[in-house]
Structures are given as structure tokens and as C-alpha cells.
Amino acid sequence: MPAFKTFSIGSGKNCDIRLNQSSIDNIHAELVIARNGKLHLTDRASKNGTFRKNGARWVRLKQDYILPTEPLRFGDYHVSVSTLMQVIAASGADAQIAAGAINGNASNQKGAAAYDPKSALPTGRVRRSVDTGEIIAVEKE
């Protein structure tokens, strides 16, 4: 089984998760589901943005880990992460990965360590990739 699966989100015909709404770009965002159930969402430089709910306000999301219970907004389209996961599961994606992420308990299974998002960050000197916006470790000179 691969370490992760990537799903494209957008209004385009080739997207894995198709959201047919005028405020959504052809390729709007990308959702990565790790084997351990961690979810990572990246906005693909969409015109109308990707947002997560923070209290009463919507906060722009460029790239971050998300929770299965989080409400999201792609442009003007409101959806929950769990709804996206149900679409993925219905499409025939790996049921073990989708089920772990839907339940939000993949990292809390018996014997598994609690997930700390900071542990996935690079250490030492870092820089942002010009191409993807991703934070990457700088090679020692």
C-alpha cells in the first residue's frame, strides 16, 4: 500500500473530486491522505481561494494539515472534510485510507502515537519553494 494518496479537487473533468460550481477553478486544490489517516490540503493558486473555519470567520488556507471534522470553503462552495472523504470512498479509493480519515481516529488506534503536526516540519534552515510554495529544508553548504 502506498504511503499516501493524492486527490485533485476542482471543477475540471479530470479532477478526482469534482465540484461543479462557478467559483471553483478547474484544479482548485489538492488533498493528500497519508496511510496513517493524516490529511493535508493545498490550494493550487486558485482565483477564489480555499478557506477553513476559525471560530466565526473564514481564514484563507494555502497549505496545511486539516481535521476530518473541519468545515472548508472552496471559492463560494461550502463543504466538510468528511463529505469529501465520502466522495473519495464512493469512488472506489482505498477503503482503509478513506475509512481511517473519515473516522478521524487513524492516529489514535491501539498502540499508535498521538499525531503532532510540528513533528512533520523540517528542522534547521528552511526556505519556501518558488514552484510550489512548500516549505523545504535547505541543504547544508
Image (spheres, rainbow, N blue to C red):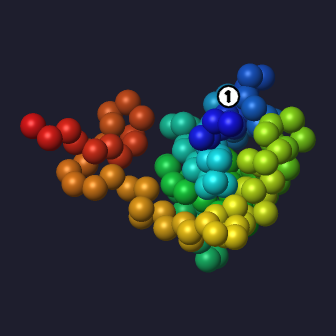
Q: Closer to the camera, 12 or 16?
A: 16
Say if residue 95 shows up in the picture: yes
Quadrant the N terminus occupies: top right
Q: Position of residue 69 (x, y in %)?
A: 73, 66
Callout 1 crowding tier (Cα within 10 Å): few <14, some 14–19, many ≥20: many
Outermost residue, front side? 111
Q: Residue 45, image x and y in percent?
A: 51, 37
**Residue at the spot 50% in from the left edge and 49% down from the top edge:** 63
Query: Observer-nearest residue: 136 or 60?
Result: 136
**Which residue shows up at 58% across the image and 50% down it?**
40
Residue type, mark 1 in image: Asn
Left/right placement of residue 33 relative to residue 97 reads left
Residue 70 seen in render = no
Residue at which label 1 appears: 26
Q: Is residue 68 left or right of residue 29?
A: right
Q: On the image, which quarter does residue 56 sit in?
A: bottom right
- Image x and y of residue 125, in percent: 20, 51
- Under circle 1, the secondary element is loop
